[in-house]
Image (cartoon, rainbow, N blue to C red):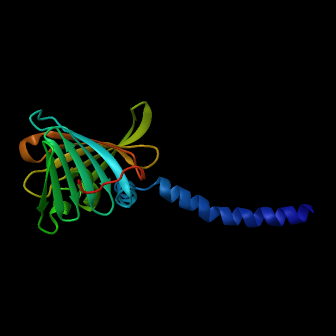
Amino acid sequence: MSLLRSVIARRLGWMLVPLSLFAATAAWASPKEDLKALSVKFLALRSYHVSMENSDKRMPKMDMDFVAPNRYRMRMPMGTQYVIGDTMYMSIDGRTMRVPMPKGTVSQWREADRCFREIDKMQVEALGVETLNGKPAKKYRMTQNTGKTPTSSILWVAADGYPAKIQTTGGHGGTTMTIHYSRFNDPAIRIEPPK
């Protein structure tokens, strides 16, 4: 019986070596590899909610809901806009206008996920762990020097592996945009064109 236990223990030991090496490799992933993995996970989401505000107080605060693959609802003080595919619906003062957009327009202004589509173009630095909303979050700095105006972003990643908050400084006017993320894959988020 003890011989059988010894043989089983040796075989299990050899099976655990590759698993422990895999775990060690995952722990040694670079900050850029961490954010590439986050990017794949985030861009596969079926839905999420964001709230955005700009350091330039002339820019209105905005809440946005997203439902894959191409539905958005943006709530601003001036009214609500819906984007479904390449059509925008603007609701202002109780009236709704339907505005067709050129193909590809949406992908150019998807600010809430733009940085997750451009990780390869960025320098990424791990900044340790910080408490955000009472919970620990990994913190990263992402810098992009391509284009006319360099941008720098600080990203907080929650324990579930999704982004919790991002602050981006640079771009036009050197303002800071702060985006808070929530309600990942929430089936209650539905976006239909306004009636």
How many numbered marks appear? 0
Q: Residue at x 12, y 64 (%)?
A: 100
Would residue 18 be seen by someone viewing this image from the given angle?
A: yes
Front residue (pair 88, 150): 88
- Is 188 left, or right, of 117 in this rendering? right
Residue 14 found in image quarter: bottom right
Would residue 119 be seen by someone viewing this image from the given angle?
A: no
Q: In the rendering, at what x and y percent does residue 56 appear?
A: 11, 35
Front residue (pair 5, 164): 164
The correct choice, above or below, for 41 with respect to 126 in the image is below
Q: In the rendering, at what x and y percent does residue 194 appear?
A: 23, 53
In the current view of this chain or complex, which residue is farthest to the top? 134
Of the 4 image quadrants, the one containing the C terminus is bottom left
Q: Which residue is drawn at 11% across and 67% down?
A: 102
Residue 116 found in image quarter: bottom left
In the current view of this chain or complex, which residue is farthest to the right? 1
Q: In the rendering, at what x and y percent does residue 28 appear?
A: 46, 54
Of the 4 image quadrants, the one containing the N terminus is bottom right
- Is 156 left, or right, of 177 in this rendering? right
Q: Which residue is drawn at 49% across and 53% down?
A: 27
Q: In the rendering, at what x and y percent does residue 120 appear?
A: 27, 62
Front residue (pair 170, 99): 99
